[in-house]
Amino acid sequence: MAEKAVNTIRILCADMVQKANSGHPGAPMGLAPSAHLLWTKFLKYNPANAKWANRDRFVLSNGHACALQYAMLHLSGYTDWSMDDLKAFRQIGSKTPGHPESLFPGIEISTGPLGQGISSAVGLAIAEAHLAARFNKPNYTIVDHFTYVFCGDGCLQEGVSSEASSLAGHLGLGKLIVLYDDNHITIDGETELSFTENVVHRYEAYGWHVQSVHNADNDLDSISRAIEAAKAVTDKPSLIKITTTIGFGSAKQGTEAVHGSPLGKDDLANVKKKFGFDPAQSFVVSEDIYKVYNHTEQGAASEKEWSDLLNRYSQEYPELAAEFTRRMKGELPAGWKDALPKYTSHPPTATRKLGQASITALAKVLPELMGGSADLNPSTFTYLDISKDFQKGHYAERNIRFGVREHGMLAIVNGLSAHGGVIPYGSTFLNFLGYALGAFTVGALSHYHSILVMTHDSIGLGEDGPTHQAVEKYMICRETPNVLFLRPADGNETSAAWAIAIENSKKTSVLALSRQNLPFVNGSFEGTFKGGYVLNDSEGKPDIVLIGTGSELSLCVEAKEKLQAAGVKVRVVSMPCWELFEAQPIEYRESVLLPGVPAMSVEAGTVGGWPKFAHAHIAMRSFGTSGPYQEVYKKFGITTDNVVEKAKLTVEFYKSTPCPNLLRKPFYVN
């Protein structure tokens, strides 16, 4: 029966790819025995409740093999995964896209960009370890689940997996088990073309427990024993190298030809004959095979047993139980926002330091807030003084030392968010977002609640020079869907930015904070929530609107005083978040950016995107330079005097030229 079950998986996956005439049949056919064992013997889950808090997590890091995951979800009894869903593989509007997306039930992590899955799985394992240390009590193991990963050669070649795996070994995450599909094939051909390292020794060096199964095509017993042994190792993550044959059963097995293309009708028919199936039939699963995989009764019983335990726990530890339930639901405690500092004044202070005041206050009322920096705590000020370091043996703590691993950090933050029960953050310099764009994009498209504290946000960091000065990163963030890019100018706006990031649980928030000190401008906490607002106004209709963000808002305030002395009426608008401003009704937006009044933007980043709000711009047209930050700003014309000069020219220009209403300008997106 086991052989028939495994071969059913192989053929079902091949049928999916063949019908779509697109996809990757080889890895699913090679991994079918391991999937069979995992779903029938090891995984703890309830198909009727894909979000059961104490389920095991499964991550398909080699996301091109997604036909395998979809097949297993269907076979095991998830009602959300019908045979019709499998037949709609890679079609518009289906739950079976070309790579797994966590927007669909049963998919824990969005994967596809290689290395992201295994790296985010480290975040899942960190969350499990942290919550277990926080909530488990003698006789009440409320949090107790494994994170299982399938990955391939491509995942282990990507640098992000090295970063995350190194940290996982350091932390001793014993409930992380990775099955590495060693099938010797990548898109170009045999792995010997470019990948000859000893993966076993590499992961041993990381501090992992490592095993090898040399015949994972047929030797179910060896695979099973290896997983059992991995589960028994509690102080190290485990890697099991399973040697498989890509496209097992196909005439093209063991070659790159079966990696990313359908088998073809003739080859698929021959595979079916070889395995004892009718070549004339497709998408056929016999009732005895459904009985092998259906996990509905067992899953419901497992969840009920856990729920009964949680109920008893609630009687003995009511406060902990209430906190656990609230956190797993993603609910915030009443009054949390009141903890944030509000300011009537403050001396010139870097917003990174003001951010420290915010995160320190929030940490006291939000025990779910946890994270850290990429070896930059003395610079980003995101260390939680209320806690100590999350380290091996100290999993209840909340400060994660990510090390110099920006890409791994963001992928792990994605995993922490995907797990639930924590609100994660990661911190580095804004310009180093470039190291982590893969994870940044996956987090945004997955609607993960990730908070990225990015300091040293502009040319204003000065002497470190253009390699450290963010110029184009503002637009990368603003142009990435489902991202809130927040660039506050003072204490009130910084507190509000943190509140916005906490509240927006389905978005990635980027807090761009300054290294240099900024003056208090009496920013509006409430106005920041609208993305843009009138900071201060003119008497009567203004001649020009100056729009600033972050470090440059104070330049607009200073310029207003000089312009008014010259007889020019000025409105100053703060726009810390484009995305929130654009979400406001048109009536509100036009009350801020007045129709018929020219507007000029002032920001130390590239100009792209600003023409939809402003008619003239002071911005960067090159990378920065090294020097004292005041001199750097002067070199690039981002000064009060230049704002005054260009504002006068803009007002003069529009005296004789009609001033278009940019907010109602025709704008179409197909």
Image (cartoon, rainbow, N blue to C red):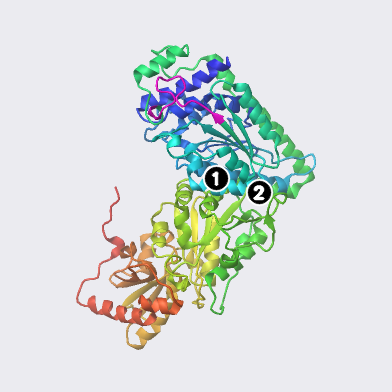
Q: Secondary structure at mark 2?
A: helix
The answer, for residue 152, to whether it is visible in the render is: yes
Q: Amino acid at mark 1?
A: Ser
In the rendered view, tell whether residue 601 sits above or below residue 289. Answer: below
- Image quadrant in which you'd find residue 250: top left
Q: Taking 179 as reference, is 23 left or right?
A: left
Residue depicted at x 49% and y 28%: 68
Q: Secondary structure at mark 1?
A: helix
Residue depicted at x 31% and y 81%: 645
The answer, for residue 556, to whether it is visible in the render is: no
- Image quadrant in which you'd find residue 356: bottom right
Front in this rendered view, residue 301 or 473: 473
- Mark number displayed over residue 171: 2
Task: State which mark lies toward you, 1 or 2.
Answer: 2
Q: Position of residue 629 (x, y in %)?
A: 45, 76
Q: Earlier in the sequence, mark 1 or mark 2?
A: 1
Look at the image and tell me in which quarter the N terminus lies. top right
Q: Taking 423 as reference, is 261 left or right?
A: left
First to last magenta residue range: 242-257
Residue with the mark numbered 1: 120
Q: Position of residue 39 (x, y in %)?
A: 59, 27
The span from disc 1 to disc 2 (Cα, nearest Å) is: 15 Å
In the rendered view, tell whether residue 558 sits above or below residue 252. Answer: below
Q: Does the magenta segment cover residue 432?
A: no
Q: Amino acid at mark 2?
A: Leu
- Mark number displayed over residue 197: none
Dot 1 crowding, Cα within 10 Å, few <14, some 14–19, many 20+: many
In the rendered view, tell whether residue 447 sits above or below residue 258. Answer: below
